Amino acid sequence: MREILGRRRGFMWSKWSRRERSTPRAAALTCAEQWRWPVVPGAGFELGAEERRGTSRSGAVRACACGRPDCAVPGVHPHDPELLAATTDPRMVGWWWTKRPDAPVLLATGGPASAVSLPASAGVKALATLDAMGVRLGPVIATPTRTTLLVAPYSMEELGELLHRHDWVPSSLRYHGRGGYVVLPPSDTGTSRAAWERAPQPGPGGSAPWLPDIAVIVDTLVEAGASAPDGSRLAY
């Protein structure tokens, strides 16, 4: 009986993986219903004149639907509804993405999952180092400019103690704890789509993805981030 259940569990994870690559709505429902991760739709993008005519250029800058010309993270930030509305209710999640099927999927961090992100170039270096060390990683998200590693929830006090051991911490690292969010695949980020660099793998019980503790990876991320341009650039 255990063997049969194990096979079914593996089949379900394979099925979820295929679904999450298909549409933002399928990804959002998987997060909310199966993984119990609270999600909320991102602002998305306005349809420009070139897109309406079907003549838009690949890589062209797109305006955020929030209407702010100086938007720091165009398209991939909470707008309406706000981040506090993030939920695991599949009925609400399904309704949101039925109304806006192309809306980016935003995970509200600090509950079941948190995250750390760094510039893409530093992310490549960090992943190679962690692999060489034999560290088991959780889900890793890649965009053209950022690499985001999902981790188990952590407090700001815990993070502060971990970072205090370093003489210098690059400001290009970002920490997504309570009150934060990250964009999940297969969301449109304006010039490309967020993708799984490392796909989610089942955790204990086979329901939500397995997540490492931040203490296991943060030193490597700080070291790798030192090789990337420092600064507070927010764009995904």
Image: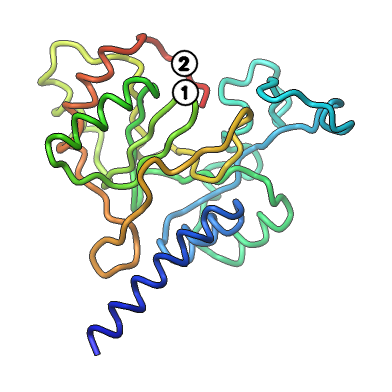
Say left or right for 157 vs 114.
left
Name the outermost residue toward the bottom: 1
Q: Residue at x 63, y 62 (%)?
A: 94
Tell me the element at label 1.
loop
Which residue is under mark 2? Answer: 233
Residue at numbered disc 1: 145
Q: Where is the N terminus found, in terms of image quarters?
A: bottom left
Q: Secondary structure at mark 2?
A: loop
Mark 2 residue type: Arg
Dot 1 amino acid type: Thr
Q: Is residue 180 left or right of residue 86?
A: left
Residue 134 lies, in percent from the top left, at 13, 41
Q: Is residue 117 left or right of residue 62?
A: left
The mark nearer the N terminus, 1 or 2, is: 1
Seen at 60% across and 46% down, the residue is 41
Q: How is the image coloured?
A: rainbow
- The image quadrant of residue 65 is top right
Residue 7 position within the rendered picture, expressed as x and y whole percent measured from the top left: 32, 78
Question: With respect to residue 21, does 67 lie above or below?
Answer: above
Frontmost of labels 1 and 2 is 1
- At horizontal 49% and vertical 44% (from top left) the residue drawn is 184
Asked whether the beta carbons under mark 1 and mark 2 sit within 8 Å of each other, the answer is yes
